[in-house]
Amino acid sequence: MTNLGFEHFIDGAFVAADAVIDVINPASEARIGTMPDGDAQLVEHAVTSARAAQQGWSLLPANERGQYLRRIAQGIRNDIPRLARIISTEQGKVLPLAEMEVALSAEYLDYTAEWARRIEGEIVTSDRPGENILLFRRPMGVVAGILPWNFPLFMVIRKVAPALLTGNTVVIKPSEETPYSAHAFARIAAQAGLPAGVFNLIGGLGNSVGQALVAHPGVDMISFTGSSVAGAAIMANAAHNITKVSLELGGKAPAIILNDADIDLAVAAMKTSKTLNSGQACNCTERIYVQRAVHPEFCEKLAAAFNSISFGDPFGETPVEMGPLINRTAVERIEQLVDDARAKGAEVLAGGSLDRREGCYVRPTVLAGTQPDMHILQREIFGPVALVDSIDELDEGIARANDSEYGLSSSIFTRSLGSAMHAIASLKFGETYVNRENFEAIQGFHAGVRRSGIGGADGKHGLYEYTHTQLAYIQG
């Protein structure tokens, strides 16, 4: 699949523009197309269109808004093979995972549409005779969604679906690394008859379109998924207009493996965590703390599992478990982290050498014996590298797990309910998984603490992120 095209989508119409940004297939590092870099004028047009459409959209019954989501979901299901190939081409994930992403996107739309009849307010008891106090949930208004590249279609859906159902209109900026999935979504949304201005899409860089969108006074909420550094910058820019932000940022997920754990289960979960999207997910496990009695067995089995991982071009003749990283910069960053750890005494149990073939590949790697002065222990790796160290007891594992500026996902493997509950109560993370891989449910609430973000996504609580409350005091 080559020569993919991109157009902005504003006020119900596709807007052609001069393309200035090359889009690269990370599996081959070949140019697959281009995308335009928008500007402040386009942002103004998109926000103005969204603002004009918002009141009429919010006045529709929620169930009617939900029907639009269902039509879009069906349009996605009708086009799974093509959409999956777009994702694999621009982002590099293997085709089965890309197909899963497309199917999950459609499911997420249908799930969100089910909430149309479940959005609830409250009746609050009054201190005054004859008075009723009612709490309503109202749409924020215009929502700006700024997307990452790691799940390029699903992240569109994750922001658009709850925003639209609750009566907001949206302006989306996809990652410049992966714009074509968002453009394909715009085509499907247009075919579903979504009213003009309700959904808008602008391509461009973060320091042009992203900055203009975040700073725009006509934007009522910003939903961003990406790095903690970028999230902090967005939060600072949003402060000028006191704009609400929902930020899903980085992670440094720890896993604790106790002596009574099912070791084979734990190894399989760690392998899944690091092969899924080549480890390019904010909730993938990066730090593994193993109780000393089972540490040798776990390390031996984990190293064998990582050495068995097949990787390469998702469109190659032989199926592979893992594709490339997103770009050459990501490869070089991980290489530097691994080299720094090795120079400071970390032991390489699997992988370690980076693959210098054509494409942006990193060999799955396991390191043991990390120390506090190693950059790899504190910085987000975002790739197929796992760090394994031994602990004497659960509380030591909890302390080491919490020794991070991030607080998104965590996990524990044990057959003891008491140990699991103690860990859940003590781990300073938004999510804790017990005896399973770190992969959230659409009906849950994917949210972090500390430098992992503010707010969250999915489920009832994720839906309500896109609303504000209004209290009515009615004196009888």
Image (cartoon, rainbow, N blue to C red):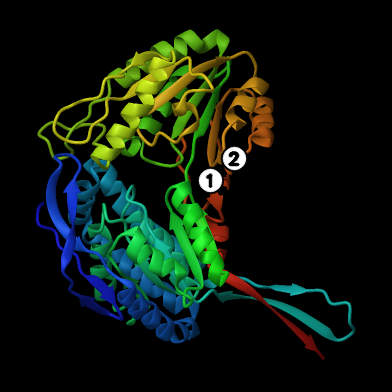
**Looking at the picture, how far across and down is residue 346, in whole percent?**
43, 15
Check disc 1 and report the residue beneath it. Answer: 452
**Looking at the picture, how far across and down is residue 97, in whole percent?**
29, 43
Disc 2 element: loop
- Left or right of 455 in this view: 368: left
Nearer the observer, 426 or 212:
212
The first of marks 1 and 2 along the sequence is 2
Nearer the observer, 76 or 438:
438
144 over 392 or under it: above or below:
below
Check disc 2 and report the residue beneath it. Answer: 429
Query: Who's the residue at 25% across and 31% down the image?
Result: 321
Can residue 243 be seen at all in this image of the molecule?
A: no
**Looking at the picture, how far across and down is residue 472, in whole percent?**
72, 82
Q: Callout 2: 10 Å neighbours few (<14), some, many (20+)?
A: many
116 over 45 or under it: above or below:
above
Q: Amino acid at mark 1?
A: Ser
Q: Quadrant of residue 451?
A: top right
Of the two numbered discs 1 and 2 in the rendering, the one whose residue sits closer to the viewer? 1
